[in-house]
Image (tube, grey):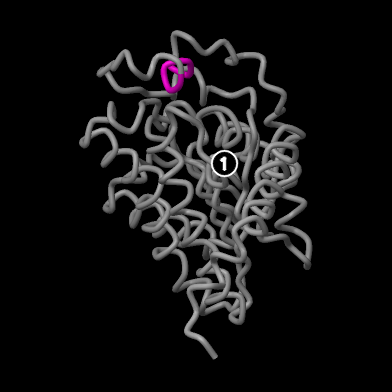
Amino acid sequence: MPTWLITGCSTGLGRALAQAVLERGWNAVVTARNVSSVADLPALYPRTALALPLDVSDRTQVAEAVRAAEERFGGVDVLVNNAGHGYRAAVEEGAEEDVAELFATNFFGPVGLIKAVLPGMRERRGGAIVNVSSIGGRLAMPGSGSYSATKFALGGLSDALRKEVGPLGIKVVLVEPGAFRTDFAGRSLQQSSVVIADYDATAGLRRKENDTSHGSQPGDPIRGAQAIIEAVDTADAPFRLLLGSDAVEIVGNELRAQIKEIEQWKETSVSTDFPE
């Protein structure tokens, strides 16, 4: 039976995914910064669930979590980098220390876990790495520049990674959800304390106090978890997996706009070549 190691399991998509994996009878290493928030899962599934504390920005905890997973279950077959949080601020408003912490959690945390599980996956010539990104990794909205920067970085890393490890039998799936009914836009959302009035009509509209989307997002975490399992469990796994009707529409519109701009500026673009 496969062993999944999932980060950020206290609520939302991570929690739904952990429950779905365990309901299938598979092994799950469920992690959260506050391990008490996932302590009920080993109580329900004592033979197949292992709950561990994990702050993905803590390299010692990352190494310990992977080592514990290997000792208990023999190895990690599927890594799901789900832990992360949002950050709202105009680029000018963002505090350097806040953005550094955002990258430590949303980007360097997944990198550390990937590097920790790959030796075992390479040895077994199999496995899957699932990196939970966002439609914010395809386009950036006002007020989410720093957050999108972490997800664009994760997408670029994942694209190279799949080409490196694919020949070794290891899958990489980049999950790009739209708006899901989780704590992402509520408790987990952080923002800058600096407010610049000139951005009130752009980035300011998406500050927490002005955002009314929380609790009414279209995405269902339970259905999202099922889609991730389906993608990982198929031989022809997609690299990019959009989740949600909003994700399909928004990313589709963005890609069509990009293609249109390429065509509009094609003559200028190709004019920069050396003459033949």
Residue 148 colored magenta?
Answer: no
Q: Residue at x 51, y 38 (%)?
A: 140
Position of the N terminus, as image quadrant, is: bottom right
Residues in magenta, as a range: 202-207
Position of the C terminus, as image quadrant, is: bottom right
Q: Residue at x 35, y 22 (%)?
A: 191
For residue 235, side relative to residue 257 (left or right): right
Residue 43 x %, y %: 56, 32
Element assignment for label 1 = loop
Give the amino acid at mark 1: Ser
Residue that carries the numbered disc 1 in the rendered image: 134
Residue 19 is drawn in which quadrant? top right
89 in relation to 272, above or below = above
259 in relation to 146, above or below = below
Q: Residue furthest left?
A: 97
Viewer-nearest residue: 71 or 61 = 61
Residue 204 colored magenta?
Answer: yes
Residue 56 x %, y %: 36, 45
105 in relation to 266, above or below = above
Residue 212 x %, y %: 57, 10
Viewer-nearest residue: 50 or 276 = 276
Q: Residue at x 40, y 58 (%)?
A: 111
Q: Which class describes the residues within 10 Å of circle 1: few (<14), some (14-19), or many (20+)?
A: many
Q: Residue at x 28, y 30 (%)?
A: 92
Viewer-nearest residue: 2 or 94 = 94
Query: Dominant secondary structure of the magenta stretch?
Result: helix
Residue 71 x %, y %: 45, 61
